[in-house]
Image (spheres, rainbow, N blue to C red):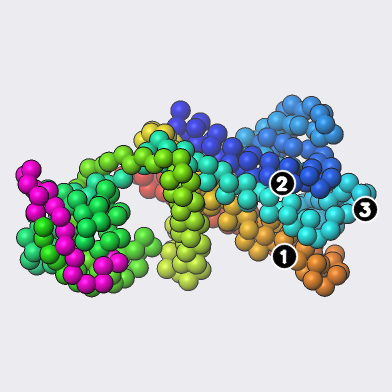
Amino acid sequence: MGIIIGLLVLSFLIFFHELGHFLAARFFGVKVERFSIGFGKVLFKKNWAGTEWAVSAIPLGGYVKMKGQDDLDPLKKSSDPDSYNAKKPWQRIIILLAGPFANFLLAFILYLAVALIGFNELAPKIGKVLPNSPAAQAGLREGDVVLAINGKKVATWRELSQLIQNSGGKIVLKVKREGKIKSIEIEPKIMKTKNIFGEEIEKPMIGIAPAPEFVKVRYSFLEGLKVAWQKTVEAGSMILQGIQKMIEGVVPAKEIGGVISIMDITAKASQAGIVALLSFTALISVNLGILNLLPIPALDGGHIVFNLYEWVTKKAPSEEVLYRLTLAGWIFLISLMGFGLYNDINRLIGANGG
């Protein structure tokens, strides 16, 4: 059941991306010849409102086929008024941006839904105190619940960590211990730790780790709008940093995953509950939007670069350059997907091999 949910989620995200392209194309009067749910052989089709709506054999997303635009044959163009090529460069750029924008919008809506349902956050309860750390020297103990730092209420471990990092000096913790409230003064110390990419970094810390307890944090609609925006921006920033670290070689190539990894993690998220599933779906939606904006020929970002060039120079790229770059883009993408699939299979073999 989890794999089916993973397949449906991935298909929905790509479908929503293509829906963005479709709506923008129709807004500018571009004829959309086909809107397909799935790829490959067409199993069912119906003409409606000037577009062929189809269901295809491979249920991994979908695609829109605009008149005068063909990713597999970039030289196949049409000069008809209702074709993609007949539109001005800035109009084509908006059509191209509409797909990634749809993914960002979907992520925002999903994060808003999670904010209203309630995020599962680590409770500000101390699970471990490191020996000889500032926390140990100040007398903090395992089981202490941090209620406030410097007078600011603390509801989650995330808030606790942020207040410590931004303290800039001594802090006063209000903690609950065995039903009694205590105030404890501590001076954070610059300590070494690792970030999410495995890099060693230094930051102000007091030497505590969280207990495995969670609290549900709900927000009002207006608060949820702000949280959803922050979560969407955070997800985008994390993905961009991940791409940068991969280029720098900080994140090893073996960490690159493919469709199997996405479906596997989505399946596990669905088993963890609706909040986990919606949060992960939002993250993948942001990921899909950003990846499509990369300036790689055959992706939306590559097409945007071509159109920007035409807009600035008042002339389209030469057909030979366009063909060669698009072909190189497809080779790169197919190689990357193949490498991701290779890593996925290796991980499966490793897991099954014990």
- The residue stretch that appears in magenta: 165-182
Q: Earlier in the sequence, mark 1 or mark 2?
A: 2
In the rendered view, tell whether residue 260 sits above or below residue 297: above
Tag 1, which secondary structure? Answer: helix
The residue identified by callout 1 is: 305
The circle on residue 127 is none
The residue identified by callout 2 is: 21
Q: Earlier in the sequence, mark 3 or mark 1?
A: 3
For label 2, count other residues whose C-alpha is less than 10 Å away and answer few (under 14), some (14-19) or many (20+).
Answer: many
Query: Residue 181 magenta-drawn?
Result: yes
Q: How many marks?
A: 3
Give the residue displayed 74% in from the left and 46% down from the top.
24
Tag 3, which secondary structure? Answer: loop
Q: Quadrant of the C terminus?
A: top left
Residue 231 x, y percent position in the rendering: 45, 51
* Direction from residue 275 to residue 160 in the image, left or right: left
Q: Earlier in the sequence, mark 2 or mark 3?
A: 2
For label 1, count other residues whose C-alpha is less than 10 Å away and answer few (under 14), some (14-19) or many (20+).
Answer: some
Residue 276 x, y percent position in the rendering: 40, 39
For label 3, count other residues whose C-alpha is less than 10 Å away and answer few (under 14), some (14-19) or many (20+).
Answer: few
Q: Label 3 near label 2: C-beta < 8 Å?
A: no
Between the residue at mark 3 and the residue at mark 1, the CA separation in whole angstroms equals 21 Å
Name of the residue lying farthest toward the right:
80
| Amino acid type indicated by mark 1 | Val
Give the residue displayed 12% in from the left and 64% down from the top.
185
The residue identified by callout 3 is: 79
Q: Nearer the viewer, residue 337 or 189?
A: 189
